[in-house]
Structure formats: structure tokens, C-alpha cells
Image (cartoon, rainbow, N blue to C red):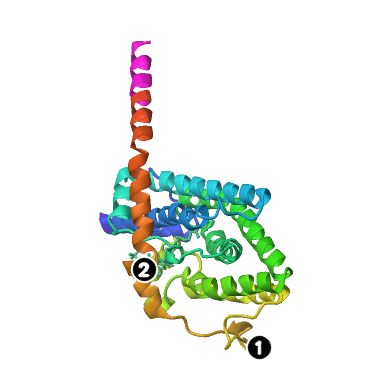
Amino acid sequence: TEAELDAIFQQRIEDEQKIEPKDWMPDTYRKNLIRQMSQHAHSEVIGTQPEGNWITRAPSLRRKAVLLAKVQDESGHGLYLYSATETLGVSRSELIAALQDGSAKYASIFNYPAQTWGDMGAIGWLVDGAAIVNQVSLQRTSYGPYARSMVRICKEESFHQRQGYQVMIELAQGSSKQKCLAQDSLNRFYWPALMMFGPHDSESAHSAKSMKWKIKRETNDYLRQKFIDQTVSQIEFLGLEHPDKNLKWNEERGHYDSSELDWDEFYAVINGNGHCNRQRIQHHIKAHEEGTWVREAMAAYKNKHIKAQHVA
Ligand code: 3HC
């Protein structure tokens, strides 16, 4: 019966067995994974827009090459994650349609504009830094293809974070104008980076199920706290002011106590009313339409190749 299958499945999860595409899984497990993994892939792809805007404006050839490499990596992470999601029995075109019609989400952080070169530093350092905290945890997720994709992605993320932090070091140790640029980017990207970890556990719609199925290995608040704690000394090293005026070390907790986030802003942005939501989706739709000829050529080549195989 379904109940017996569920029980066997849950025992496999308890026994730390990886669930593979051909294994039986509860529909709700499958649907939750398609939701999270496809939104993860959408985030990688939409995230290339703010950074892509700065490739032609990079201050040096080296910075341009490094940023180009990062944007290329992120597109590859998206491809990787779409392919991993497709193992759950959903097509790429369905996933893209959900992104473009607004029914699927992507990381809220990418709806904030990248206004200065300092933002390229803050995004690499803070956004990829937060993504690393989240993705290192996801390397142990119960679904095999997702866990394996995280191992590869995490290796590239550390380069993304380090190149961003290096930009911040150069600016913070540069002229007073450059230091102000770094401080302004830190101030604008610090809070939205904390929102990448999702709502409080008490408000999280999916965390209880995701923890039970070991899709999530740590909770939103646990990972957010880890990121807050690790960022304090990085801000100190830059000689910048911490954006959170209430930040205070709590010896008893062994963590920093910090200000509450602006959850009205969080829900406004994830429900489509951030600075750049419409622009990001329109750009994606336009680029996707312009790429139709590539998909058609691939399909024609594939059909010709299959026919040639049948003839041979
Ligand atoms: N941005 C957009 N939506 C968010 C969000 C955020 N920062 N945080 C939460 N949400 C959404 C959830 O998707 C869910 O909505 P849905 O039911 O329509 O999907 C709702 O808010 C409730 O949140 P939950 O905590 O219940 O949702 P989850 O259990 O899915 O937890 C999460 C949210 C922690 C983001 C989890 O989905 C996750 O770990 N996802 C994988 C990691 C990921 O997507 N990272 C995004 C960044 S990728 C990136 O930064 C690229 C890097 O290379 C630059």
C-alpha cells in the first residue's frame, strides 16, 4: 500500500540512503524537489543579469575576464540544475514557462539593481558567500542528482566569493571615494543577502517537510546565523562599518544577536514587486525568444542524427 511504500521510503531517508531518479518516491517529495531545484536553477540564470550588465563596464581587462568567467559558471550551474530537475520527470520547457509566467520564484536578491562596480564585489562576496553556506549544506541533500550537482557547484562558488572579496579589498584599501563605494555596496546588499536564506523557520512553508525528507539538512535560521557570524570579521578586515547597528556578540548563545529583517520588503520582492522583477523576466523572455533558432537547430541535428543511426 501507499502507506507501506511511504514507510519504506522514510526508512531509506533515515538510513542516509540517496534517492535516485528511478527509485519510488512520494509525489509530494518529487513536487517539493522540482519546486526547489528549478527555482535554484532559475536563480543561477537570472543572477547573471545584474552581473552581465557590468562585463562591458569592468575597470580593467583582468576584472572583465574574471567577471565573464563567473557569469559563464553561473549559466553552467543553471544548466546543471535544470538537468538534475529534469530527472524528476519534468521538461525544460515546462520549467522555463513557470519562470516566465511568474508562477516559479528565483532568489529575491537578483531583483536588486547592481548600480556600481562595488556591487560586483558585494555580490560575489556576500551573495555567493551566502549561496555557499546554503549549498555546502545541500551537498548532503537526500536526492542524489541534486547532492552531486552541489559538489561541483560549490567548488566554483568559492572562486566567485574570493574574486568578489578581492574587489572589496581593493576598493576598501583604495581612495576615500573607493572606500565609500565599498561601504555603499555593503549597505545595499547585506540585508537582501540575509533574505536569501528564506523566512524564519516558524514562517517557513516547506522547512518541516524538507527537514523530514532530508532535502534540507539545516534550517533557514541556522544557516542565516552561520552566515551572519562568519561575515563580521570579513567586514572588520575591510575596515568598513557593519550595516547592522544592533549587532552584538551573545556569549551565552555563542552567536551574534542581530536586527530583525524587513519581512514586508522580503515578501514584496518574492511576490514580484521588487525593483527589477519585471525587467528581469522581460529580459529573460527576450533572450529566450532570440535563442529559438539555436534550439531549433539542435532539434534538427538530433533528429538527423537519430535517422542516420536508424539507417546505419
Ligand atoms: N527568494 C525567493 N523566494 C524565496 C526566498 C528567496 N530568498 N526564500 C524563500 N523563498 C520562497 C520559497 O521558494 C517559498 O515559496 P514557494 O513555495 O513559492 O517556492 C516561500 O518563500 C517559503 O519559503 P520556505 O523557507 O518555506 O521555502 P524553502 O523551504 O524552499 O526554503 C530556500 C527557501 C532556503 C531558498 C530553499 O529553497 C533553498 O535552499 N533553495 C536552494 C538554494 C537557492 O535557491 N539559492 C538561491 C541562490 S542561488 C545563487 O545565489 C547563485 C549564486 O551562484 C550567485
Residue 218: in magenta span: no
User: Percent from the top left, x then y, of residue 218?
Assistant: 51, 68
Q: Is residue 15 above or below residue 265?
A: above
Q: Nearer the viewer, residue 273 or 201?
A: 273
Q: Secondary structure at mark 2?
A: helix
Does the magenta run of residues contain 304?
yes
Left or right side of 57 for 31: left
Q: Residue at x 58, y 80 (%)?
A: 243
Q: Kindly report which numbered mark, 1 or 2, lies closer to the viewer in this rendering.
A: 2
Under mark 2, the amino acid is Ile
Please state, as top left, top right, bottom left or bottom right, where the N terminus lies in the image: bottom left
Label 2 near ligand 1 (CB < 8 Å): yes
Which quadrant: the C terminus?
Answer: top left
Q: Which amino acid, by three-letter code, is at mark 1?
A: Glu
Kindly tell me whether residue 256 is visible in this rendering: yes
Q: Is residue 152 above or below residue 266?
A: above
Front residue of 253 and 52:
52
| Mark 1 Cα shell of 10 Å, populated few (<14), some (14-19), many (≥20) | few
Q: Which residue is labeled 1 in the image?
A: 251
Callout 2: 10 Å neighbours few (<14), some, many (20+)?
A: some
Mark 1 or mark 2: name the one nearer the start of the chain.
Answer: 1
Query: Residue 302 shows which numbered tag?
Result: none
Which labelled disc corresponds to residue 270?
A: 2
Label pair 1/2, CB-CB below 8 angstroms: no
Query: Could you give the CA–CA distance between mark 1 and mark 2, rounded to whole angstroms?
Result: 34 Å
Of the four image quadrants, the one with ligand 1 is bottom left
| Tag count | 2
Residue bounds of the magenta highlight: 302-312
The image quarter containing residue 277 is bottom left
Q: Residue at x 51, y 70 (%)?
A: 193
Q: Position of residue 273 (x, y in %)?
A: 33, 69
